[in-house]
Image (cartoon, grey):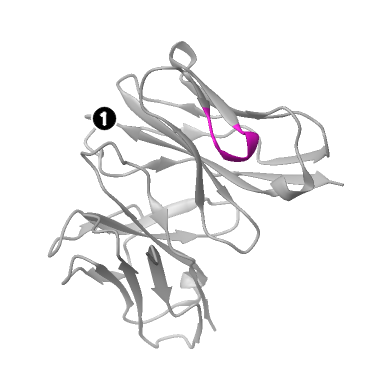
Amino acid sequence: NAGVTQTPKFRVLKTGQSMTLLCAQDMNHEYMYWYRQDPGMGLRLIHYSVGEGTTAKGEVPDGYNVSRLKKQNFLLGLESAAPSQTSVYFCASSQWGTGTYEQYFGPGTRLTVT
Amino acid sequence: AQSVSQHNHHVILSEAASLELGCNYSYGGTVNLFWYVQYPGQHLQLLLKYFSGDPLVKGIKGFEAEFIKSKFSFNLRKPSVQWSDTAEYFCAVNAYNAGNNRKLIWGLGTSLAVNP
């Protein structure tokens, strides 16, 4: 099993450009999450999904959109990138209700917005 | 709102020293507790977790943590650290029935540097 994968690994954008980050998991997990990690600020939840076709806002959703059209994929979109969105983005997945509550993380995407 | 506090932001130790990283949470109900580790340039990995039962939990690489309900704490310990333990450590809590039980609440992390 590949676990949680993310593409791309690195990206540089100019202010105002758009992009989509792809997260895929092969563990049949119901729940998926997008975080951003910035120095000294820990992990902050952007959006999450509790199942195919559902999405919900986390603590820092502004400037991002997400979609979960297939259970195994969770897409994070930036419609008009800003320098404040320079960060490392992590996707995670988990399965609740079976005792396996921990989140499994992808390798991350390092995004720089100039 | 629920929160997780990690008191030590940066810790520097020499090899073979003992480690204790503090984690406190603010929620009076049932909790699941986690410690994750992030080695330089890598993603987060689970070190150990507590759900129920024995409050002393053993994880990978010689780490352990003790859940003290009365103190709302879940401190991470290792008796003798190695240079390879240099990493960032995150405490996380799932607060049952608090309206957010599909999400984890994260501490800000503790950066550990172990000098050889």
Q: What stretch is highlighted in magenta?
A: B58-63
| Left or right position of A49 against B112 | left
| Left or right position of A30 against A19 | left
Crowdedness near tag 1: few (<14), some (14–19) or many (≥20) residues, C-alpha within 10 Å: some
Q: What residue type is labelled 1?
A: Tyr
Question: Which quadrant is the N terminus of chain A positioned in?
Answer: bottom left
In the displayed orientation, state which residue is furthest to the front. Answer: A1
Q: Position of residue B12 (x, y in %)?
A: 79, 41
Name the foreground residue: A66 vs A60.
A66
- Residue B47 lies, with reference to residue A13, above or below; the image says above
- Chain letter belonging to callout 1: B
Q: Where is residue A89 in the image (x, y as percent from the top left)?
A: 45, 66
Residue B59 is one of the magenta-drawn residues: yes
In the displayed orientation, state which residue is furthest to the top. Answer: B70
Q: In the picture, residue A38 is in which quadrant?
A: bottom right
| Left or right position of B17 against B58 | right
Q: Where is residue A35 in the image (x, y as percent from the top left)?
A: 40, 59
Name the foreground residue: B60 vs A74.
B60
- Residue B70 lies, with reference to residue A75, above or below; the image says above
- Helix, strand or loop at disc 1? loop
Residue where numbered disc 1 is placed: B96
Q: Is residue B10 visible?
A: yes
Give the residue drawn at x 14%, y 60%: A54
- Residue A25 lies, with reference to residue A50, above or below; the image says below
Question: Which quadrant is the C terminus of chain A positioned in?
Answer: bottom right
Give the residue drawn at x 31%, y 41%: A100
